[in-house]
Image (tube, helix red, strand yellow):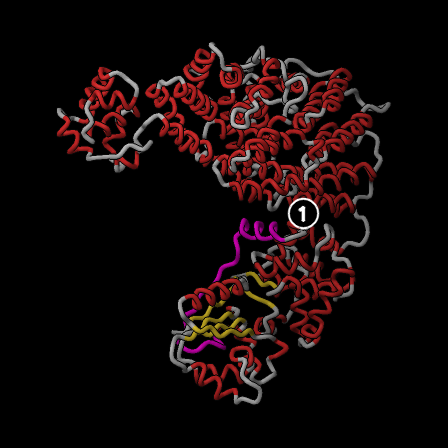
Amino acid sequence: MTAVVAPRGRGTSALLDLAARLAAERGFRVLRAAGHADERDLPGAGLHQLLRPAPGADLRDAARAALGRDGPVLVVVDDLHLIDDFTAGVLRESLTGPLLAGVPAHRAAGVLPPGATVITLDRLTEDEAATLLARLPGVPRGRARLEMLRRARGNPRAIVELAAAFPGEDDILRLTPARTLPVRDRYAAQLSALPAGVLRLARQVSARLGDENLATVLGAVPGSDDHLAAALDCGLLERHGEQLCFAEPLAAIATYTSCPATDRAELHRRFAAMLPPGSLPYVRHLAAAATEPSEPLAAMLEQGARRAPHADQAAALQRAAELSLSPADAARRYAAALTAASLIGQTGWVHELYTALLEQDVPGALRAATVATAAQMKSRTGRQREAMDVLADGVHRLGLPGMPPLTGPDALLLASAAAQITQVSALPEHRAALADLVQRLDLPEPALLRRAIEVTLDPYRPWPMTTAGDHDQTPGDDLTLAYLAEAAGDSTTAVRHRERALARLRRNGGIVAAPEMWLPLLMGLGDQGRYSEAMTLIAEVRRCCAITDLPLLELEIDAVGSLISALRGDVTRARALAEPPWARAYLHENRRLHYFLSMTVGVAAFTEGDFAAAYQHYRRLFGDDGRTLYPDSGGHALLGLTVIAPRADRRDDAARVLPAYDEPATTRMRLLVEHARAELLGGEPAEERYRTAVADPAAATWALDHALARLHYGVWLRRQRRPLDAREQLSAALLALEQFGASALAAIARGEVKATGAIDDEALDGRDVLRALSPQQRTIVALAARGLRNQEIAAQLLVSPRTVGTHLSQAYHKLGVRSRRELSALVGPASPSR
């Protein structure tokens, strides 16, 4: 059987490598070669690769011997259509076994033997292509990344080659000679060998700006349909349905840039003549041909951009601004382009547009919304001090003489942008700057945003719950309500509001429009033990980050993913995910990221059993006054300190932070402080404090907190020689921690359960019928099934024989048995695990 891979996306090399390795593992002798245009005229070049014969040996005889030998032989040839004719002939004559080859789809019919099996590989999806590009080292961000993806069209080889050829941020956008000359040299010989008609067609195709179809291309070059077959046959162009494009994007760039500027302008004018007048594609080609400002053309671009996707809208408006005659019109169009670019998470592009807007120096052209957006987008790069400087400079410009006073919604918008920067940085200097800004601005009241600003100014004090009222109509309102709910200690409501905001953002196609929400949302899901959902969301955000320009979000997502991996015992992955934030982030001005990243390495050290290092990581999260260095309404640092300190033998030191929590601000903090005081201080009140942390009706709201409180209470009970009571708490903690996938903590709980004398579930042969029993009942039933009497069971478990009898009676009823004999028949003998 001959199998041939005919790839549309030229992504066969990795597939052929994998197939060759798999065949070798299964006992095949694998012979490999690759065709190349420079070796096509060298007879036997392919056979030399396949056989590596001794000097002077007859190639045809060596091939017959190798291909006809005993045992399975697999021949693997990449770019079969470029192999030399001599090698191709020998393969046809002598090959009796399987051939796995790569060949472009349009060349398959000419080189394949009759009856060959053809497997056509599709191009990468948008997500797959973006993910591949994002993983390449040193790849540019922002608009350059979008342009590479547009040109590559899902071709994996093209993605890699474009990233290598245009590593700078503007290289592929500007097509500077320094970058295009090597590309032109690479294809110069191929282009010079083309017939004139084929070259004209190729040059027209190279000027495509979007999805100009085959009819449009052929109409722009009269008579070019006569040369289409030749262009396809030589492999320069490919046809996919009604689309005609270059097989290799670098060849398109070489063809386009090898034309003089006047010829390139004519190519675009020809396309415009074939497109509907007034449409955005029509205007974009006219704009590409323009060499000087034109207000009519700028106005047409602005008009055509109104219904375009945000990326096309931003690009069209930016070009319209560049073509504007009036600085005021240019400033207005730059501002509109800035808004569109912000909606697709393009921070660098927004900064470029904001700089161009300010350079117009038009009094009154600047708006509060533009300043707020520019500052927020700078914050999303992780440069919080620069972000606050952008905001302060914008407020100064807006407050110059002759400008309207900053009141009402404008004032609120600027203050909320400053609050957002402060929430992420947690720097005292930013809190002070926010307070000063609030004093100078006339903020409307009442307003949800104003309450959120007040919380940001004093995040450590208790805040009452804010109800939704009539406000929760937009994702922004839901996110503000989530922040306020979190400040009031209601993380369940906070998660619900953020999930509602996410649903609305999904409907509008922009889940990265509010990147600041992701870290608290994911932490909230973790608090509820919803780790699988959190990991699914993390994967979704990572896919979006592959085509956006949101560096801080990428680092925060890595930090949360690292923390969850550490909790689940995957320390290798946790450390790998934590490395980029440590290396790339400005941690001194991104305290939120630094805070949760420190927890990650602390949990990783704890999972590895290095309790001293884990304690140091967590202890550094608290200042001299016992307050956390980042406002943490969830008490995550205190919970971690409570878990780690006893195992690091640092109870006394950890207890020094407790006076800062003498007046817990929320129900969650009250329960957590009771838990921490019981664990770190001990003494007579310990059991009452444990009971409060475990039995309060609200405790189950925070699943991880509750499980750890039950774990510590169970350990305390066991040490008080109360094994059955301990087992109840420990078994419940173990079940919850296993459901979360918190393997390191679950291992501790499992060991404590066994230390109470409980029967290992595996020793019970996993019988489902026993799952209806309580942990105490399962233990007693297993011992009774082994033949132990009540007195013996009581002595082993340190309880009274009467208690054993009561549990057995209840178990009989649940299992539907009436005697020990029936119990033994149902359960079978089991061995206790101590």
Q: Residue 261, position in %: x, y?
A: 78, 62
Q: Residue at x 60, y 46 (%)?
A: 546
| Kind of residue sitting beneath label 1 | Arg
Q: Is residue 321 left or right of residue 125?
A: right
Q: In which quadrant of the rendered view does residue 777 lie?
A: top left
Looking at the image, which is closer to me, 686 or 232? Answer: 686
Decide if residue 308 is in sight here.
no
Residue 688, given in percent of the width and then of the height, sits at 44, 11
Q: Where is residue 264 in the image (x, y as percent from the top left)?
A: 74, 62
Q: How many labels does the image show?
A: 1
Residue 345 is left or right of residue 706, and the answer is: right
Above/below status of 774 relative to 445: below
Quadrant housing residue 313: top right
**Rendering quarter of residue 307:** top right
Asked if residue 553 is among those painted magenta in the image, a careful observer would answer no
Q: Name the residue under label 1.
A: 141
What stretch of residues is rendered in magenta? 109-136
Determine if residue 641 is in view.
Answer: yes
User: Where residue 234 sits in the image (x, y, percent)?
Assistant: 59, 74
Name the residue rendered at 79%, 29% in the picture: 394
Residue at image location 39% in from the left, 31% down from the top: 750
> Residue 121: within the magenta?
yes
Depth check: 21 or 776 in front? 776
Considering only vertical position in the picture, is 287 above or below 678?
below
Q: Quadrant of the N terminus?
A: bottom left
Q: Is mark 1 on a helix, strand or loop?
A: loop
Q: Residue at x 75, y 31 (%)?
A: 385
